[in-house]
Image (cartoon, rainbow, N blue to C red):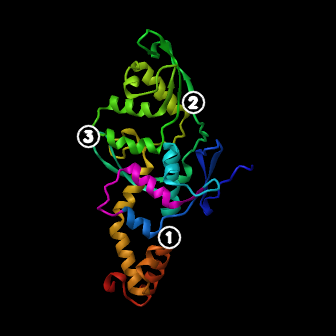
Amino acid sequence: MLEPIERPEEGLFLLPGGYLDPGGTLHRGVKLRPLTGREEEWIADPTREWTEAVLTTALLRRCIERIGPDRPTEAIIRSLSIGDRDYLMLRLRQITFGKRVGMTLVCPRSECAQKMDVDLDLDQIPIEAKPVLPHYALTLSEEAALSDGAGRLHRALLFRIPNGGDQEAAREWSTLDAPERVVRLLARCLLKIGDTDPVTCDRVATLPEKGVEEITAAMERFSPQVRIEMEARCPECSHPFTHEFEIGPFFLGELLRGRTQLDREVHLLGFYYHWSLREILGMTRQKRHRYLRLLTEELDRTGRSALEVG
C-alpha cells in the first residue's frame, strides 16, 4: 500500500503517530476540513462546561473527515495519542485561521513584566514521526523494580502511550495531588508488570520513585510530540526566556473569545445579503471574510460603513 502524502491545501496530513485499527493496521493519513461558523458558535456556547480534552475530542469528531479510509468515531479519536491530537489541533487551526499565530508574551521577571508581541509560523514547527505500536516493552533498573510480597523483583513490563481517553479521565483526578494523579495515569497505561496480578492503582503505588521516573521517561520517549518551545528575549530588560506554546488551549481560547465577532459577522452578512442564519453559519471563516471584504469595499465606494448602518 502506498504511503499517503500531505497536501495541506486539500486538508490532507500525516499523523506523527497514527491510528492502529483492531486488525493491527496503522493509519497515518488524515483528512481535515476547516471549521464553519456552526462549530465556532457551538464551541463558544457559554453554557458548555466541558474540559479541554472533551471539547477537543468533540471538535475533532466534527472536523476529521477520515483517518485512513474511514470516518472516525469519538472512541477512535479518544484512542489517538496526545501528540496526534495536538497535531490535529495545530493543523485544524492552520486551515481555519491561517498559519500565522500572533500572541503576547510577558517577561517572567516580576520586576519587569514587560509585554511583547511575537509571531509564530505553524509551517515552521518541526514534527517528528513516531508511528505508534500496540504496546511497548521496558526493563526497569534493579533499583526501579517492583517488589512483590514474596520479595521478588519485577523489572519487565509492557505499557501503551497515553491517549485522549486518559486526558478525559483526568478530570476525575483534578482534586488529587500530583503523585496520585501519576499513579492513576500509570494504572491505565501499564499493561503488565512482570508476572504480578493485574495492574491496579494499589499495585502501581508500590513502585519506587525511580520506577515511576523510568516509566514516564519511556512513555515520553516513544510518544509523538508537538512541543513548541519559543526562545524569546525581553525588549525592555534583555532577559532571555523560553515560552512553551500549547496549541490546544490557544486555539480553543481563540474560538471562545471570537463569539462576539462571529455574531457581528453573521449580522452584517444577514443584513446586507439576506442569507439565512443556517447559510451563514455553514460558511467557513475564510468564505465569510471574503464576502465581508467585498461588502466593505462596496460600502467604502458609496461613502458608507458597516458600522453606520449595520
Q: Is residue 96 magenta?
A: no
Circle 1 or circle 2, nearest the eye: 2
Is residue 99 visible in the rendered structure shown here? Answer: no
Amino acid beneath label 2: Tyr
Q: Residue furthest left?
A: 111
* Up-down relation of residue 300 to residue 63 (above or below): below
Magenta-drawn segment: 44-66
Which kind of residue does numbered mark 3 sit on? Ser
Q: Mark 1 packing: few (<14 Cα in 10 Å), some, or many (20+)?
A: some
CA distance for labels 1 and 3: 40 Å
Residue 182: % across, % down: 38, 31
Q: First in sequence, mark 1 or 2: give its number.
A: 2
Find the residue positioned furthest to the right: 1
SS type, badge 2: strand
The quarter of the picture where residue 146 lies is: top left
User: Residue at left 40%, top 83%?
Assistant: 270
Q: Residue at x 37, y 25 (%)?
A: 202
The x, y position of residue 57, in whole percent, is 45, 53
| Residue pictured at 51% horizontal, 45% vertical | 79
**Dot 3 corresponds to which residue?**
110
Q: Earlier in the sequence, mark 1 or mark 3?
A: 3
Q: Position of residue 224 (x, y in %)?
A: 54, 40
Identify the residue position indicated by label 2 in the image: 136
> Of the residues shown, which amino acid type is indicated by label 1?
Gln
Q: Is residue 228 left or right of residue 5?
A: left
61 within the magenta span: yes
**Picture coordinates of residue 226, whole percent (x, y):** 51, 44
Location of mark 1 (residue): 286
> Badge 2 local density, few (<14 within 10 Å), some, or many (20+)?
some
